[in-house]
Image (cartoon, rainbow, N blue to C red):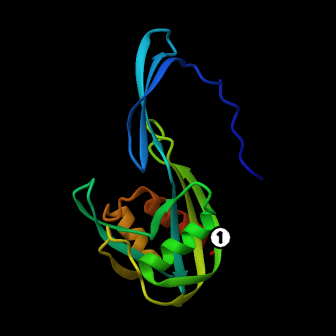
Amino acid sequence: MTAKLPPGDGNPFEVITTRTAYANDWIRVFEHQVLKPDGSPGLYGVVQYRNRAVGVVPYENGRLWLVGQWRFPLGHYSWEIPEGGSPPGEDLAATARRELREETGLEAAALELILEMHLSNSVSDEYAAVFLARGLTRGEAAPEDTERLTVHDVSLDDAYELVCAGTITDAISVAAILKLMLLSRDGRL
């Protein structure tokens, strides 16, 4: 049985004006003058992403591969599942295969969509999809010019401990690892 929630009440905001405050190849920032739910005037900024976020968990024999890299916006090193942007018109599974190959050199015989989510939905429309990759074969990685990557495989139990310890903090990676742990505990992995 699938759990159900009641329908929402609809949009309580009235948009008065909208302008593009900033735009580049990856994002647009909109500034909305609004009437808030209580009727008072307000301002709402929304970041719109050009690409959809795609993560892929390469999984084999109880192990998964993580990618380590310096994250410029955070100013520190981050361990994550392979992930990247899916341009408009590109199939999400094709993006998952491309990112897996580029970042790890791995090819997957099978992909399964295991998770969909919205990231930071109070200020952005960023959508993410996560795939489970199985039937892995190894090849050469080909990272992008903005990436200097370290690839490391860990057990699912170790990945879960790294999430619980706050070592892995990337939202897509945290959600994907927790989902895999639940699938494993339910005997569905």
Of residues 89 and 101, the one drawn nearer to the viewer in this rendering: 89
Could you say where residue 189 lies in the image, as x and y percent from the top left?
A: 62, 75
Could you say where residue 178 lies in the image, as x and y percent from the top left?
A: 50, 63
Of residues 189 and 45, the one drawn nearer to the viewer in this rendering: 45
Q: Residue furthest right?
A: 1
Residue 66 seen in the current view: yes
Residue name at image x 50 percent, y 9 percent: 39
Residue 155 seen in the current view: no
Q: Residue furthest left?
A: 75
Residue name at image x 45 percent, y 36 percent: 122
Figure label count: 1
Of residues 60 and 33, the one drawn nearer to the viewer in this rendering: 33
Q: Relative to 93, is 155 on the left or the right?
A: left
Q: Please say if 55 is above or below 42.
A: below
Look at mark 1 in the image and give the residue it sits on.
112
Element type at mark 1: strand
Could you say where residue 47 lies in the image, as x and y percent from the top left?
A: 43, 39
Query: Which amino acid type is shown beneath numbered disc 1?
Result: Glu
Q: Please say if 95 is above or below 158.
A: above
Q: Relative to 122, is 183 on the left or the right?
A: right
Could you say where residue 188 lies in the image, as x and y percent from the top left?
A: 66, 72
Residue name at image x 70 percent, y 31 percent: 7
Q: Choose top left, top right, bottom left or bottom right for residue 185.
A: bottom right
Q: Choose top left, top right, bottom left or bottom right for residue 30.
A: top left
Q: Please say if 103 is above or below 71.
A: below
Q: Choose top left, top right, bottom left or bottom right for residue 170.
A: bottom left
Residue name at image x 42 percent, y 76 percent: 103
Q: Residue furthest bottom?
A: 138
Q: Residues within 10 Å of mark 1 (few under 14, many from 20)?
A: few
